[in-house]
Amino acid sequence: MILDEIYKHKLLEVEESKERISLSRLEGALAGLSPTKDFGAALQTGGGIKLIAEIKAASPSLGVLREGLDPVALALEYQRAGATAISVLTDKKFFHGSLSNLEEVRRAVSLPLLRKDFIIDGYQLYEARVAGADAVLLIARLLDKKTLETFLKLAGQLGLACLVEVHTEEELKKVLDTPARLIGINNRDLDTFKVDLNTTLKLLPLVPVDRIVVSESGIHNREDVRRLEKAGVRAILVGEALVRSKDVASKIKELLG
């Protein structure tokens, strides 16, 4: 189980981070920060499906996606080509990301930024805010309902939006019983890393209309986007198809039609 391995490593990683930079030091850094950008509002403004473009150098299932990936250069390409927001993977071991990537991207672009990682400790929400995130990913599979509610509340206090990710009907029911407004439906099974776009199409009718649904993973071409848009999806999160593209701007134009 890949997710179990990631979770065990993340526990150690967070403890090491706490030893390196104390929570009180992060809390002290909050005072000088600019207000966050409204991630949720960005996904609802104007017509058409919204694109969260992801900066992802590698993945456990596919290995390295782009050699020598420059996060800032890619972020600027995304911004110029019409992405609504940018997702920055900050997991080091499994995805070759880092918090410093997020910090660098924040200095370079004006779009809302999502910290994509495996959030298992409130400390990581402070890290995300200080590094320049406007939103964080919370994975329902990793968090019980009480912890999820605690993280949603803390994120709100820090000015962070939360994209809460589900893959099954059971996870969706748990999340809909919380104040979460942004629901990510991951088409990838985090146990096997197999992808099926029908996951979104199956779960979407169960989501109340007042929530914003983001379809994640396995979105490669205009036909995929058209299927999702027709079903009522408001936003998509795309990484692999963009990172591997030789012409990012053309790929974004193709996806968004």
Image (cartoon, rainbow, N blue to C red):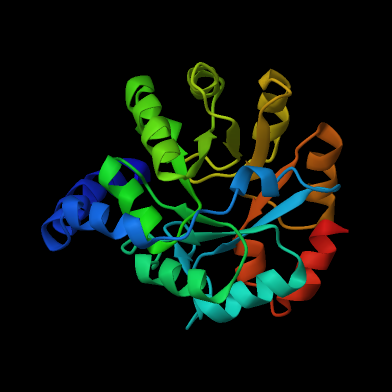
* Residue drawn 52% across the image and 70% down it: 65
User: Is 19 or 56 nearer to us in this picture?
Assistant: 19
Q: Position of residue 7 (x, y in %)?
A: 28, 44
Q: Is residue 37 above or below residue 138?
A: below
Is residue 116 visible in the rendered structure shown here?
A: yes
Check the image and name the residue furthest to the front. 31
User: In this image, 195 relative to 63: left or right?
Assistant: right
In this rendering, the answer to whether 141 lies above or below 15 is above
Q: Give coordinates of residue 83: x percent, y percent.
A: 71, 62
| Image quadrant where one finds the C terminus | bottom right
Q: Position of residue 194 (x, y in %)?
A: 54, 44
Quarter of the image for residue 243 reads bottom right
Q: Is residue 192 visible?
A: no
Q: Is residue 37 left or right of residue 159?
A: right
Of 253 and 103, nearer the camera is 103
Q: Residue at x 60, y 48 (%)?
A: 38
Residue 96, horizontal then vertical, whole percent: 38, 68
**57 and 144: which is toward the camera:** 144
Residue drawn at 39 percent across, 54 percent down: 129
- Residue 233 is drawn in which quadrant? top right
